[in-house]
């Protein structure tokens, strides 16, 4: 695709994104300069953004996405006031900011404040941090939350470069998913940190954090950031990041983002990781001490090619981001740890896919890969379907094509759409051009546009998986579990009947003290089983754990397990109301919806 063709295509996508007011016919922004002052006392950002247009304006209305922003002024680049209207907020989308641009205008400037309830921001009190001495702020803009931080064309079809200046209390450090230009001059009680993002990104990858932070280099192109008390553990856990980088480059081509830095987030971070380019955000639940969960780092690294480099044009094609990334993640793991390890992780993913298919049994449309999300919040539609069903679809294509031809086709896909946006139809057209007979060998329509899984889907295969399956629904012996890793334990616990007999739960707890498990994947798998089985001794640990983490991967199944039994349904609501302030706004929304659905 030529630059001109990509521009036309992305312009069309900006107009057809069901989650954005952006209209390409009015013009597109290509870069912006953002300046903000962090006000911890009021939980606000006092900010201004200057948006540069891709082409001089034709004149007339120009629409931006916003959510809960207090607009103070809109001017042209020279400071002359421009007429503007902030329309009433619409469900899901937020409020359309309509600006009247004169013909020939090349930029516009908006001065505004965020809301204390901005959906992309979480403000933490000192007591909610590890150090307990300073407040903390972080952003999470995926899927459509960038509009609560700055007025923008909040669609993945519009990629932009930016510069930024973030003014924070002098004792704190600001980091950003961008190239650091160093702290500026301190002024009294504040310091200003400056950044530049030289590669164009979609708005959902705009990210920053402010807190008591320290860093340690992991390699010449990677460092880890964390609160000082957690830095040594984080550096040890992620010490293998350069090996992952080299393995990924061997598979997918050169790394285009220069640096791959990591930020260990506070416990309330709602995801396992967020692939913000140049600064991946990671949950502290990965710090197990044995590197058993670093596959999450491989996943976020893989996004550097699949998602960040080639982005879904809108979130109806989310599988292009996540299915490809799961596929790439497991290829990285295979290169580093062997095919059997990658297969075991695929088996864990398949169990999570089965749970998602069951969760959406009353909404089967949400189990399709190609989605229609008009009137649907992407956060509400979020599940493992685009991840794991997308992965299985690509595995089916790989099996039909052969690994060599499939890899060549994939590399060309990444090169052709580099720093661009794409739809499912674009991918299908690419496959037809590169491997003309391939799509005829796979039931493409069944994969993309029908619910569930098609017959004959490729099931994960692993000798280690077979050893777990041989145990069945009984308690394993000490000899059987001796070679097990946390992944085998997780698979075993998830494969047991839910609920299981009390005698089995008692035997497992007596033999293996699972309620004291250190690995959160094992612990949550056990607590879900225990709660659904009515095993009372595990309930206090489940309650404490829900107050310790904010990762939705753990919150959703645990709250659902508590609501599965009448005697703990009220407890689920009580625990949520007690810990709700600790959770990120996105997690609050998801758990509240779950409890409502389950009658709690």
Image (tube, rainbow, N blue to C red):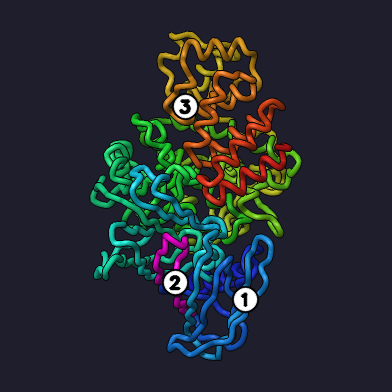
Can you identify the residue that label 1 sits on?
A: 86
Specify the segment rendered in magenta.
35-53
Mark number, residue 47: 2
Give yes or no for contact between labels 1 and 2 (Cβ–Cβ under 8 Å).
no
* Residue depth check, mark 2 versus mark 3: number of the one nearer the observer: 2
Question: Where 256 falls versus 471 (above or below)?
Answer: below
Tell which of 209 and 338 is nearer to you.
Answer: 209
* Residue depth check, mark 1 versus mark 3: number of the one nearer the observer: 1
Q: Residues within 10 Å of mark 2 (few under 14, many from 20)?
A: many
Q: Residues within 10 Å of mark 3 (few under 14, many from 20)?
A: many
Can you identify the residue that label 3 sits on?
A: 487
Q: Is residue 337 visible?
A: yes
**Alpha carbon distance from label 1 to label 3:** 50 Å
Question: Where 45 falls versus 409 (above or below)?
Answer: below
Name the residue rendered at 52%, 49% in the picture. Answer: 584
Mark 3 residue element = helix
The secondary structure making up most of the magenta span is strand
């Amino acid at each position: 695709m030529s630059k001109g063709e990509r521009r036309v295509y992305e312009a069309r996508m900006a107009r057809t994104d069901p989650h954005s007011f952006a209209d390409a016919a009015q013009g597109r922004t290509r870069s912006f300069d953002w300046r903000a002052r962090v006000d911890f006392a009021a939980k606000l950002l006092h900010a201004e953004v200057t948006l540069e247009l891709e082409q001089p304006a034709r004149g007339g209305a120009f629409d931006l996405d916003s959510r809960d922003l207090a607009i103070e002024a809109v001017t042209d680049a020279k400071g002359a006031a421009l007429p503007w209207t902030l329309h009433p907020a619409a469900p899901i989308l937020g409020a359309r900011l309509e600006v009247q641009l004169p013909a020939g205008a090349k930029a516009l400037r908006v001065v505004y404040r965020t809301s204390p309830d901005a959906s992309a921001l979480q403000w933490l009190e000192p007591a909610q941090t590890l150090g307990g001495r300073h407040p903390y702020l972080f952003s999470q803009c995926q899927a459509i939350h960038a509009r609560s931080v700055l007025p923008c064309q909040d669609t993945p079809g519009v990629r932009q470069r930016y510069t930024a200046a973030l003014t924070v209390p002098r004792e704190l450090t600001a980091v950003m998913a961008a190239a650091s230009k160093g702290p500026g001059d301190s002024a009294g009680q504040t310091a200003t940190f400056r950044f530049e993002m030289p590669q164009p990104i979609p708005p959902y990858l705009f990210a920053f954090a402010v807190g008591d932070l320290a860093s340690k280099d992991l390699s010449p192109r990677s460092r880890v950031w964390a609160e000082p008390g957690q830095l040594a553990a984080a550096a040890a856990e992620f010490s293998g990041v350069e090996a992952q980088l080299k393995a990924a480059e061997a598979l997918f081509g050169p790394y285009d983002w220069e640096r791959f830095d990591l930020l260990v987030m506070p416990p309330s971070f709602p995801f396992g990781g967020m692939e913000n380019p140049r600064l991946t955000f990671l949950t502290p639940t990965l710090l197990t001490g044995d590197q058993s969960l670093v596959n999450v780092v491989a996943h976020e690294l893989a996004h550097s090619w699949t998602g960040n480099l080639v982005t879904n044009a809108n979130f109806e094609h989310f599988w292009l981001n996540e299915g490809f990334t799961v596929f790439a993640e497991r290829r990285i793991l295979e290169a580093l740890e062997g095919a059997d390890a990658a297969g075991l992780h695929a088996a864990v993913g398949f169990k999570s896919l089965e749970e998602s298919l069951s969760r959406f049994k009353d909404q089967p449309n949400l189990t399709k890969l190609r989605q229609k999300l008009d009137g649907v919040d992407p956060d509400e539609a979020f599940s493992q379907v685009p991840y794991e069903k997308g992965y299985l679809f690509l595995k089916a294509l790989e099996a039909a094509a052969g690994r060599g031809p499939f890899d060549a086709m994939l590399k060309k896909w990444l090169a052709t759409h580099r720093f661009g946006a794409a739809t499912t139809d674009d991918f299908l057209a690419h496959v037809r051009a590169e491997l003309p007979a391939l799509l005829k060998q796979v039931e493409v329509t069944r994969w993309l546009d029908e619910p569930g899984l098609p017959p004959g889907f490729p099931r994960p295969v692993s000798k280690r998986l077979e050893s777990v399956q041989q145990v069945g629904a009984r308690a394993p012996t000490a000899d059987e579990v001796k070679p097990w890793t946390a992944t085998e334990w997780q698979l075993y616990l998830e494969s047991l009947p839910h609920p299981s007999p009390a005698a089995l739960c008692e035997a497992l707890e007596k033999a293996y003290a699972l309620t004291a498990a250190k690995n959160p994947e094992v612990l949550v798998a056990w607590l879900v089983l225990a709660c659904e089985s009515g095993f009372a001794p595990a309930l206090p640990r489940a309650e404490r754990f829900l107050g310790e983490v904010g990762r939705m991967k753990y919150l959703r199944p645990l709250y659902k397990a508590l609501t599965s039994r009448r005697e703990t349904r009220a407890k689920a609501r009580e625990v949520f109301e007690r810990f709700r302030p600790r959770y990120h706004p996105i997690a609050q929304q998801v758990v509240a919806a779950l409890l409502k659905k389950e009658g709690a």
